[in-house]
Amino acid sequence: MSQPILEVHNIKKTFGKGKYKITAVDDVSFQIMPGEVLGLVGESGSGKSTIAKLITHLQKVDEGNIFFDGKDISNIKGKACLEVYKEMQMVFQDPVGSFNPRMKIGEAIKETLCHLCYNPKAMSKAHMKEAIVSLLKQVGLKSEYANKYPHQLSGGECQRAAIARAIAVHPKLLICDEATSALDVSAQAQIIELLMELEKSLDMAILFISHDLALVSCICDRICVLYKGQEVESGETKGIIEAPKHPYTKKLLSSVLQVDIGE
Ligand SMILES: Nc1ncnc2c1ncn2[C@@H]1O[C@H](COP(=O)(O)OP(=O)(O)O)[C@@H](O)[C@H]1O
Ligand SMILES: [Mg+2]
């Protein structure tokens, strides 16, 4: 049997001191198998983004361990970090804000390719252009988008471009933190469809972070429910939706049902 691509063991993160101390992530554990989609769901402030930041080393864990592809990455530094980030990428909520506004989309993708994949000196200009166009095509954008600035794109188009940049390095794990939350309903559905296609065609695992249990339950194999930094329930999506055990999951579910009935 294959080993998990990501294992999170009892991670903990606090911010502030004394009476201002907040435990953002409190003893959370989960794992993701290669090619699997795991949903991390919980209301705003439940610690979802902090977990994403701990996995991607934007912040350091106070306690616990994170294993990527069998290797403990909790305390890696420098070059070892770079090696891991070739295989782990992130897509954020605000696609326009995730790009440098002065850089064209093609340049932004090129920067990632040069930084993490290829020696730019060993690659011809034509070859680089071909790689960029092919990535844009994979996310449903025409080649002319390479010459546009982020603000010239719609939210959905810009999120596609952000996904193109993320898959440029052939990641084994893609972390999507509220990646569709800022989009309108139809753009949201298109991005979800794209992510599901890419998950299959690239055989990539996805950690799909969202406050929206309905959305998460549509696309994830398993779900981990967070409440105030703690994991209150986790398991196969079907089991959680049909027979939630924890009162908080029941509350999340009933709010989804109320919205559906109200429509
Ligand atoms: N850098 C930080 N400094 C202080 N508190 C933080 C920081 N980042 C997150 N928090 C706090 O940690 C808690 C969890 O935040 P976050 O992980 O962003 O939640 P979510 O993504 O689920 O909305 C919140 O109470 C938030 O205010
Ligand atoms: Mg968040």
Image (cartoon, rainbow, N blue to C red):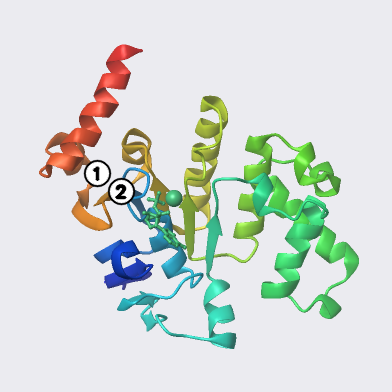
Find residue 36 and report its image quarter: bottom left
Q: Residue furthest front?
A: 19
**Which residue has dot 2 on it?**
221
Task: Please rate how many residues cluster around mark 1, counting C-alpha atoms within 10 Å: few if below 14, some from 14 to 19, many from 20.
Answer: many
Q: Nearer the viewer, residue 91 or 58?
A: 58
Mark yes or no: residue 28 visible: no
User: Going 51% across and 39% down the picture, which residue do you hit?
Assistant: 180
Amino acid at pointer 2: Asp
Query: How many dots with numbers?
Result: 2
- Residue 215 placement (x, y as % from top left): 38, 36
Q: Secondary structure at mark 1?
A: helix
Secondary element under disc 2, as helix, strand or loop, is: loop
Label at residue 160: none
Residue 116 at x, y percent in the picture: 67, 74
* Picture quadrant where residue 96 is located: top right
For marks 1 and 2, give the CA distance.
6 Å
| Up-down relation of residue 128 to residue 182 (above or below) | below
Residue at 70 percent across and 46 percent down: it is 137
**Viewer can see residue 15:** yes
Q: Is residue 177 left or right of residue 109?
A: left
Sequence-wise, which precedes: disc 1 or disc 2? 2
Task: Please state if 108 lies on the left or on the right of 92 as rendered.
Answer: right
Residue 132 in which image quadrant: bottom right
Within 10 angstroms of label 2, few (less than 14), some, or many (20 or more) residues? some
Residues under numbered marks 1 and 2 in contact, where contact means CB atoms less than 8 Å apart: yes
Question: Residue 242's spot in the image, x, y percent?
Answer: 15, 35
Left or right, 165 with respect to 15, comes to right
Mark 1, residue position: 237
Identified at 10% across, 43% down, the residue is: 245
**Residue 236 in the image: above or below residue 243:** below
